[in-house]
Structure formats: structure tokens, C-alpha cells
Amino acid sequence: MTQIALITGASRGLGAAMAEELAAAYHVVAVARTTGALEELDDRIQAAGHSATLAPMDITNPDAMAQLCRSIHDRWGAIALWVHTAVHAAPLSPAMSLDARDWDRSVATNVTATGHLIPYIAPLLGEGGQAVFFEDFMAGGKFAGAYGATKAAQIALARSWQAESARHGPKIHIASPGPMATAVRARFFPGEDREKLANPRDAARCLIGLLG
């Protein structure tokens, strides 16, 4: 029976790395807004002898997400794993200078979309599935108001789901990966020495090992 892994935010960084690593054991459904980056991901997965289904769509569109979940149910019946890496990383700025558009987009992507996705995806996971979220040390840090506050809210929601599902499943993981050489981090710290940062593929392998 085909095991399905749904990756939201799969086009780049840790999401793409997780998709590539998971493709050896799962059929990956890769969701992201950027079609070109998804196609490049698909090329790499196929070159490794595996397959994926690409879903170029915006997670902030609840109708699109509902249709995706319905399509997954109709085709496969369930998923074994959901990895949620999609995030809007607003530019660093003082809290008293938050840009309203960046704030709204951060809330829509990091909080509201997660609040829509959990009820959509939970029935697909059932009691035996697993979901993975990623907390970030920047939450509460200076200049990270929009990103940090909305990322913290996302993880608070995930922790509630984790506590509610502890006895009967699905199993909810909240991982805390260290600094990685991703485009998001480069936006926050453009002058940082990327040689000292973890490779997202290495981080993905460690995380997958924890899933079992």
C-alpha cells in the first residue's frame, strides 16, 4: 500500500529537503506557491528514482486546501505523514514599525492557514498518522515581531493539538532544528557565514530518523 507524505511549503529549504528524503519511502504530495521550484524538486526526486505529485497552490486559500484534501482522500484514502514548513518570513523590523501588509500576510500564512489546515488534514491522518511542525528560536526576539509572534502562535496551536491527540493519535511532533542554510535565514541574516550553518538535507535526515 502506498504511503503518502504531504509536505506544505515544499519548494525550498527544509521543506524541499524533507520531500527529497521522504520520497524514498513515501509518495510525496508537494505543496507550494512557486511552480518552477516545485518542478525542480520533482526533477531531483525523479532523478533519484522516486515520484511525487505536485500541488502548486497557496495555503492561504482555504478552498484550494479543502479541494486538495478531498482529492487526496478520493485518490489514496489517507496520508501517513504531514510536514508543515510553509511560512511567511516578514523582514526584520522594530515592533513599533511593523508594516501592516507584512503583518497581515504573516498572520494569514503562519496562523490562519494552519488553523484551516489542521481540521482539513486531521481526518486524513486518522489515529495512526504523524504531523511535524517546526518552532523557531526567533520567536520573541528583537526585530522579529511579525515573524516571531505568528510563528509562536502557530506552534501554540500545534501544541494544543499535540496534547489533545496524545492518547489516541495522530502523533504530533514539534521539532526545533538549529540554524540552517536556507533562503529564509539568508533574508534575516544576509551577512552570515553560511559555511557554519547546517545543510537542510542533513537536518531532514535527522528529523526523519526521529519519526521512525
Image (cartoon, helix red, strand yellow):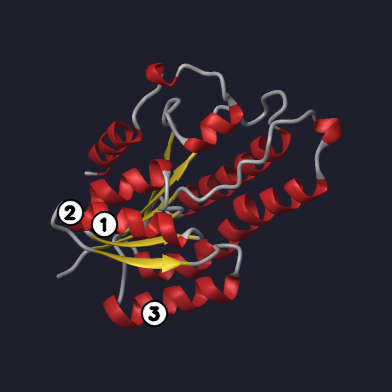
Residue at point 56%, 19% (across, down): 191
Residue type, mark 3 in image? Ser
Question: The C terminus is located in which quarter?
Answer: top left
Question: The N terminus is located in which quarter?
Answer: bottom left
Residue type, mark 2 in image? Ala
Mark seen at residue 43 = 1
Above or below, 74 against 100 in this view is below
**Quadrant of res 63:** bottom right
How busy is the neighbourhood of tag 1: few (under 14 within 10 Å), some, or many (20 plus)?
some
Residue at point 56%, 57% (across, down): 114
Residue at point 36%, 66% (across, down): 54
The residue at the far right in this view is: 96
Query: Which SS class for mark 1?
Result: helix
Residue 104 visible within the image: yes
Residue at point 52%, 31% (across, down): 185
Q: Mark 3 near mark 2, Cβ–Cβ under 8 Å?
A: no
Query: Marks 3 and 2, how far apart in space?
Result: 26 Å
Q: Which residue is mark 3?
A: 71
Query: Which SS class for mark 3?
Result: helix
Above or below, 188 against 192 in this view is below
Query: Which SS class for mark 2?
Result: helix
Q: Which residue is mark 2?
A: 47
> Relative to the observer, which residue lies in front, 27 or 160?
27
Residue 39 spot, x, y in % from top left: 35, 60
Residue 136 spot, x, y in % from top left: 53, 33
Residue 153 spot, x, y in % from top left: 64, 44
Mark seen at residue 95 = none
